[in-house]
Image: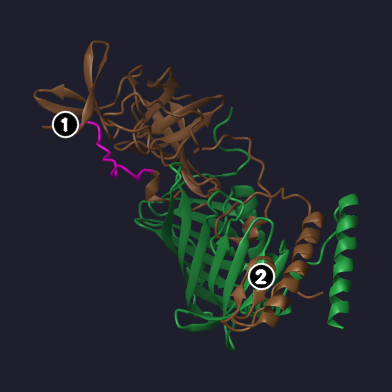
Chain colours: A brown, B green
Amino acid sequence: MKSNFKASGNDAQFLPFGMLIGRDSKRNLLVGVSRMAIACLAVYAVMALTPAATLADRGGGSIRAAGRAPAPSPRAPVHSEPSHAAPDVHPDVHAPPPHVAAPAHPDWDDKDEDIQHGGGYAHGTPVRAIRGQRMHDLPHHISIIFNNENYFYDDDGNYYQQQNGDYVVVQPPVGAIVTFLPPGVATVAAGPTTYYYLDGVFYVAQDNSFAVVNPPSGIVVPDVPSGADQVIVNGNVCYQFNGIRYQPSIQDGVTVYTVTPM
Amino acid sequence: MMQVTFYSALLVLLVAGAGASAQPAPATQPAVDPTADQILRQSCDFLAQSPAFSVHAEIWKDVMLPSGHKIQVTRSVDLDLRRPDRFHVDARAHKKGRSIWYDGKTLTVLDREKNLYSVVEAPASIDQTLDLAAETYGITVPLDDLAVSDPYTSSMKNVTAGGYFGDESVLGVSCRHVGFSTDQIDWQLWVADGPQPLPQKLVITYKNQEQTPQYIAIFTKWNLTDRAADLAFQFIPPPGSAPIPLVSQNTGGNQP
């Protein structure tokens, strides 16, 4: 049987169904049409004989990996799409959360991207402020009142409190409510609950807003908060921040951190 | 004569198609152009018979954003390999990097940005170690298609069609352009036309994924001499680095 693919030289044109014709020959066109008919039937035959695709794409950049069946994994993904659209209740400050997630079929180095915590379309690269940092002026922000205390929440997801005329970067209190998620937030599923994580702060959706919450033990996050302390516990390196321990490991080729409240 | 051939082929295909709709699908012969098959086989055989090589790859990958936009990210990869039981891969993106060492006994993964690494015992061959990394730890070693002992069989495993698309130059190197299809991907290879038929460019199109993202690799700095010392395949922890677990896909992660 003739192959569906045949070309010689650079003047050949590749057309659908493997039909290749020269530039200016009617005869070639007729031959091409005949080949197309054969090719159509061949494609039909191949489609009829081939089982439905059951293999998933894994491992970008690898022909081998594309043909490999997905490994069984009982765990929820570290990154996934939000299960619901974030409420657009603060249009004057921000659009819905400009969340940048991993590709649908991440490779071991796909997660190695600055875009994980970068900006994206319509907003610049977020600035991550370290707790305790002091500044005279606040960036663009909204005010939050929680337990009769004033907090300021900027467009990049940093929280501040006023102290002695300055603004100090602080950890937001558990229970605080914000109307939009910061850019670069990671979506982390743990059991039935979807958490949103960024820089040591965990959120869950609550009505049309997002509440700051304590993380469940064992949840896996993609990075540690800025300013976390590296410590050795039982001979293993880990990180501590705000009463939470972050135990690193390499999963699917990517460094992630398992959270344990201390 | 030509008409006879045409109608014979038509009849065969109709019968095959009709039979297929009523019976379980038997194995089909891939529709691969013999020239394409020969070009790929020559290249793969040449690679398989090279006891050692090193290569540099510049890689571009499409990434889909939840916003619907498609962007492209860039990285470079260097692979040093000595058959049958050594390889070292350095993958570098902006500010970040990951490296993998296989020394015949252990597999090490280093996160260069975080200066953390994992070491696990590894099987005795490159192929087995690539399988261990992928199937147990979810790690697709970059350029693994070049590293396997039988690249031809590995890459043709799921191919349903293939063609030869003429000659082209890749960075000034005259190449023969071939393309192959599987159910999941279309992949194209540009193979140097000469005594050393080495891959010069690879494009993989994930045709079943939204926006059909592509992976593009340009291969340069091929070196077929066994220039890497044994030390190059052995992991030496960088100053200040710390070991962490390499977690199996079946045991790690967020449990319900």
Can residue A127 be found in the magenta stretch?
A: yes
Relative to B224, does residue B93 appear above or below in the rendering? above
Spot occupied by residue A8 in the image (x, y as percentages of width and height): 64, 83
Q: Residue at x 87, y 72 (%)?
A: B7
Q: Which residue is mark 1?
A: A138
Badge 1 crowding class, 10 Å Cα cut-off, few under 14, some 14 to 19, many 20 or more, is some
The residue labelled by disc 2 is B151
Is residue A97 highlighted in magenta?
A: no
Position in image of residue A96 (x %, y %): 37, 32
Vertical arrangement, residue A252 with respect to residue A18, above or below? above
Which corner quadrant of the image does residue A86 belong to? top left
Residue A70, percent from left and from top: 66, 47
- Amino acid carrying mark 1 in the image: Leu
Label 1 vs label 2, nearer the camera: 1
Pointers 1 and 2 within a single chain = no
The N terminus of chain A lies in quadrant = bottom right
Q: Where is residue B161 drawn, in percent x and y?
A: 71, 67
Q: Quadrant of residue A186?
A: top left
At 58% from the left edge and 68% from the top edge, which residue is drawn?
A: B86
Residue A81 visible within the image: yes
Please tell me how many numbered marks the rendered image carries.
Answer: 2
Label 2: few (<14), some (14–19) or many (≥20) C-alpha neighbours in 10 Å:
many
Residue toward you, A93 or A220 = A93
Q: What secondary structure prevails in the magenta region?
A: loop
**What is the chain identity of the residue bearing mark 2?**
B
Give the side of residue B164 with respect to residue A256, left or right. Answer: right
Q: Say which element carries label 1.
A: loop
